[in-house]
Amino acid sequence: MALQNIGVSFRQVQACDVLPEARAFWNAHFDHGCATIYNHDITQRDLKDLEKFSVDLYVAGFPCPDYSIAGTGSGIAGKTGGLMLNMVATLKVMLPHVFLLENVAGFVTQHQPTYLWLLDQLRRMGKGYWVDARILNCKDHGIPQSRPRLFIVGIQKERVPKDFVFEWPPEIGHVPLSFLLDRQTSKATVKDHPPASQTQAFKNWQTACRQIIQKLEQNPFESHICADIDGSRGPHWMDGCVPCLTRSRCGKESHWLMGRGRRLNLNETARLMGMNPKSIDVDCVTKNKMGKMLGNSMCVNVLERLLVRLLPAAGWRHLKLLDRWGSLSSAKKAAAALNA
């Protein structure tokens, strides 16, 4: 979607996802059909099948549960953490001109030896790669969702121009949360709360109300506060911004909008990931699975900002790429387009 948004045509030659709903989503949303090779299980991939392709761009978000602060903490020894090795093996065979990888910030902060090992492996692939990495937060690049993620970018050294320049996108802040929500039809009151049957959520909602009144001296029901009320450690709320939209939250009940007296809906979740819900066929999978996929996704706005810099830096200077999220004023137009 990010490539489409910046006007770059492409043909996918390889993809991999163990989830049937992810494959169904791909087939439903891209008119050139499924990838030439679509592996269901990266551990069963025959690397010889990939040798015939000349790949310009490789993008991967390798599994994060074993690296996340909220996950198992098992790292590379975990059930999914070791799949990073399969990704590296794939990269060493395909040797793309450019790659872009993504994972949680905890990969750096909690598993630094593995992180440094990965960077070393990437730099030594083929005849060498220029590699850099940085943690970027979605809320600093136009969309009000707190989602810090590690991005690793690399370019074949043979393709790096003599006057090579790659600059990470500067922070611009974010648009008002209301830009990405459905139109408000009524005001919230104290009666608009999670059902008492949702014991944890109801308790956290009550706690959040008290905290907002005490700390901000605001009426929670007239605020722009979004709260994660389903955690066992109490509520986590933010003013004018959404706490991280995770797979577990989006697949069940999402965050609570204090000033709307309700949960975020699926369309709003898509917008907060940088996607226009009207461009998504929500019927291609169940609502629960669609929510989980959104929570697993990369923020499209951040991907756009990276690609408009990374592709020209790798030599594709003929591409006239526009950073739709390059300033707060342009971000407002891009956000409005998501809610059109």
Image (spheres, rainbow, N blue to C red):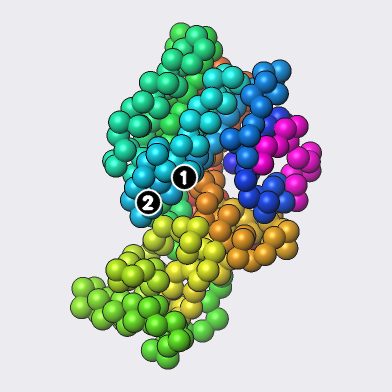
Tell me which amino acid carries mark 2: Thr
Q: Are marks 2 and 1 in contact (CB under 8 Å)?
A: yes
Residue marked by disc 1: 79
Q: Which mark is residue 319?
A: none
Q: Is residue 186 visible?
A: yes
**In the rendered structure, which segment of residues is drawn in magenta?**
27-40
Is residue 39 inside the magenta stretch?
yes
Tell me which amino acid carries mark 1: Lys
Q: Is residue 136 visible?
A: no
Residue 145 located left or right of residue 111: right
Is residue 298 inside the magenta stretch?
no
Please tell me whether residue 315 is drawn above or below residue 9 in the rendered image: above
Q: Residue at x 32, y 67 (%)?
A: 236
Please tell me whether residue 206 is drawn above or below residue 231 in the rendered image: below
* Quadrant in which the N terminus appears: top right
Q: Residue 51 location in percent, x, y? A: 67, 18
In-front residue for pair 16/85: 85
Residue marked by disc 2: 72
Question: SS class of the residue under badge 1?
Answer: loop
In-front residue for pair 198/98: 198
Please tell me whether residue 334 is drawn above or below residue 100 in the rendered image: below
Q: Earlier in the sequence, mark 2 or mark 1?
A: 2
Bin the neighbour count of mark 1 within 10 Å (Cα to Cα): few under 14, some 14-19, many 20 and up: few
Q: Quadrant of residue 165?
A: top left
Q: Residue at x 27, y 76 (%)?
A: 212
Q: Residue 155 location in percent, x, y? A: 50, 20
Bin the neighbour count of mark 2 within 10 Å (Cα to Cα): few under 14, some 14-19, many 20 and up: some
